[in-house]
Image (tube, rainbow, N blue to C red):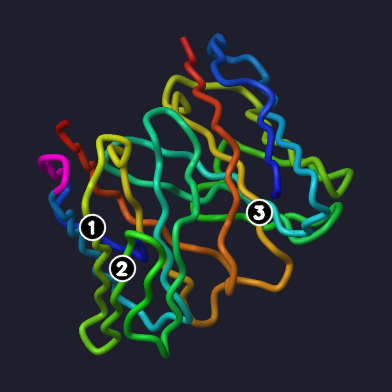
Amino acid sequence: DVKVTQSSRYLVKRTGEKVFLECVQDMDHENMFWYRQDPGLGLRLIYFSYDVKMKEKGDIPEGYSVSREKKERFSLILESASTNQTSMYLCATRNPQGTAYGYTFGSGTRLTVV
Amino acid sequence: SQQGEEDPQALSIQEGENATMNCSYKTSINNLQWYRQNSGRGLVHLILIRSNEREKHSGRLRVTLDTSKKSSSLLITASRAADTASYFCATAQTGANNLFFGTGTRLTVIP
């Protein structure tokens, strides 16, 4: 089974800090995604990547950036954390053959910005 | 919004009863998927139904898809307390490479 590991379950950061959320997968999948989940809004796509050093903006990229230096690792960066970025962040990976297969999610990182 | 919408938002049933959740969407799709999320955790893929399929089964799960009505339903039969979770539908829309998730149905199964 594919395993997707997010480095932190809970994180508390101060406004203005630079925050790194790490995601590592162990199945050599090319496609990786970052979502945020907020009550009443469901999951919203922030960024995704189809290959190393490749990135594409999702629906809500503002205030975020990403890094994909190695295939197994996809990092989400909050350049200057703000309180409205308090949320649950979910990383996912997908079989490279496209949307015909389901996503595998990490356990999530609950980020609180104070 | 490109998201699907689940109905109801919350559902509470007794153990042993069946639970039905519905999902509506707006655009043409390649497939529709259902996921489960236990409180505070990541999502787990349950089942995928392709646009040319009308019904699919997996264990106690039954999914239907009506592309003419742009809707799907997830039926969990003989529910258990361990089925308590949030359930999300996600659509793989034609021409898009990503999934679009709904806002979920919160299912509570009372022992």
Pointer 2 residue: B62
The x, y position of residue B46, in whole percent, is 45, 57
Task: Kindly indicate the quadrant of the structure image that contains residue A54.
Answer: bottom right
The reply to whether dot 2 and dot 3 touch (C-beta < 8 Å) is no
Which is more toward the observer, B64 or A86? B64
Q: What chain is tagged by disc 3?
A: A
Identity, as a three-letter code, of the amino acid under mark 1:
Thr
Q: Which residue is drawn at 76% across and 38% down?
A: A24
Magenta segment includes B12: yes
Quadrant in the rendering for residue A21: top right
Does residue B93 show up magenta in the picture? no
Chain bearing tag 2 is: B
Query: Which residue is denoted by mark 1 in the rendering?
Result: B77
Write the residue at 55% across / 39% down. A90
Residue wearing tag 3: A48
Residue visible at 50% across and 21% down in the picture: A82
- For mark 2, does the 10 Å Cα neighbourhood hold few (<14), some (14 to 19), or many (20 or more) residues? some
Q: How far apart are labels 2 and 3 at the CA level?
A: 31 Å
Amino acid at the residue labelled 2: Arg
Q: Are dots 2 and 1 in contact, CB under 8 Å?
A: yes
Tell me if mark 1 has few (under 14), some (14-19) or many (20+) residues whose alpha carbon lies within 10 angstroms of its own.
Answer: some
Q: Give the range drawn in magenta.
A: B10-16
Q: How far apart in space, not on screen, are marks 2 and 1 (Cα)?
A: 8 Å
Element at badge 3?
strand
> Do pointers 2 and 3 mark residues of a single chain?
no
Q: Can you say whether B84 is above or below A11 in the image? A: below
